Amino acid sequence: DAGVIQSPRHEVTEMGQEVTLRCKPISGHNSLFWYRQTMMRGLELLIYFNNNVPIDDSGMPEDRFSAKMPNASFSTLKIQPSEPRDSAVYFCASSSQRGGRVQPQHFGDGTRLSIL
Amino acid sequence: QKEVEQNSGPLSVPEGAIASLNCTYSDRGSQSFFWYRQYSGKSPELIMFIYSNGDKEDGRFTAQLNKASQYVSLLIRDSQPSDSATYLCAATTGGFKTIFGAGTRLFVKA
């Protein structure tokens, strides 16, 4: 079975440019999570969706960051305008939540973002 | 601020020994706990999850949970050099939100 698919794997762009990261969750999973990982701050939850609806976006650092999930098989994380401090590895994860216990999340390979 | 705390390490153990990784969490309402392994430059990979007090064993891995002490641990028996990685502890806090610790780096010496 295909896992969580993220694109692009690497992105290098100049400050001020718009960056769009993409994620396809595991088929059948109904929860999707966006994380950012840096050496200084570790793995931080930015936003998560359940059944395509944003549930908690308290981790989104600023208005420059936005995320959408137009359908069950696709999500985007957009940064506009980008800044050098946004450089990090961005992970998407998905899980199947059907009430009761919180199920484990499965991570994509990540997008390594460098803003020059 | 709800937190998950881990010793950053590095924890160094000889091949064949037991590696013990520890984690504490601040939200007494946390119900689900996870251990992930992350190799350098790779994504986190699920190792174990535990929901109830006590021990849960899977092969060489044992997860231990003590909700009264808000403490989770991971034991790796017969450690191998391939176990060398960063181990992330995670706990849920409200809804499906999961908080990750900063990770413990483990080195297994051949």
Image (cartoon, grey):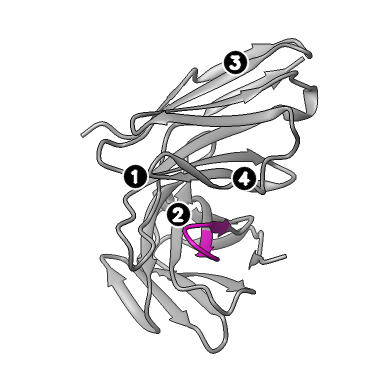
Within 10 angstroms of label 2, few (less than 14), some, or many (20 or more) residues? many
Disc 4 to disc 3: CB gap under 8 Å: no
**Foreground of the two, A56 or A88:** A56
The x, y position of residue B27, in whole percent, is: 61, 74
Q: Which range of residues does the magenta coloring cover?
A: B89-99
- Marks 4 and 3, the one that precedes in the sequence: 3
Instruction: Give the answer, above or below, for where A6 lies relative to B23.
Output: above
Q: In the image, what residue occupies the spot 52% across and 61% down?
A: B90
- Chain letter of disc 4 in the image: A
What amino acid type is highlighted by mark number 4? Asp
- Chain letter of disc 3 in the image: A
What amino acid type is highlighted by mark number 2? Tyr
What amino acid type is highlighted by mark number 1? Asn
Q: Which mark is residue A30?
A: 1
Left or right? Give the position of B36 relative to A65.
Answer: left
Within 10 angstroms of label 4, few (less than 14), some, or many (20 or more) residues? some
Q: Which mark is residue A57?
A: 4
Left or right? Give the position of A63 relative to B19.
Answer: right
Q: Which residue is mark 2?
A: B36
Within 10 angstroms of label 3, few (less than 14), some, or many (20 or more) residues? some
Element class at badge 2 = strand
Element class at badge 3 = strand
Left or right? Give the position of B14 relative to B12.
Answer: left
Q: In the image, what residue occupies the spot 34% across and 30% down?
A: A73
**Residue B90 part of the magenta segment:** yes
Q: CA distance from mark 2 to mark 1?
A: 21 Å
Closer mark to the observer between disc 4 and disc 3: 4
Mark 2 and mark 1, same subunit?
no
Q: In the image, what residue occupies the spot 63% across and 17% down?
A: A19
**Residue B109 part of the magenta segment:** no
Mark 3 and mark 2, same subunit?
no
Q: Which residue is mark 3?
A: A11
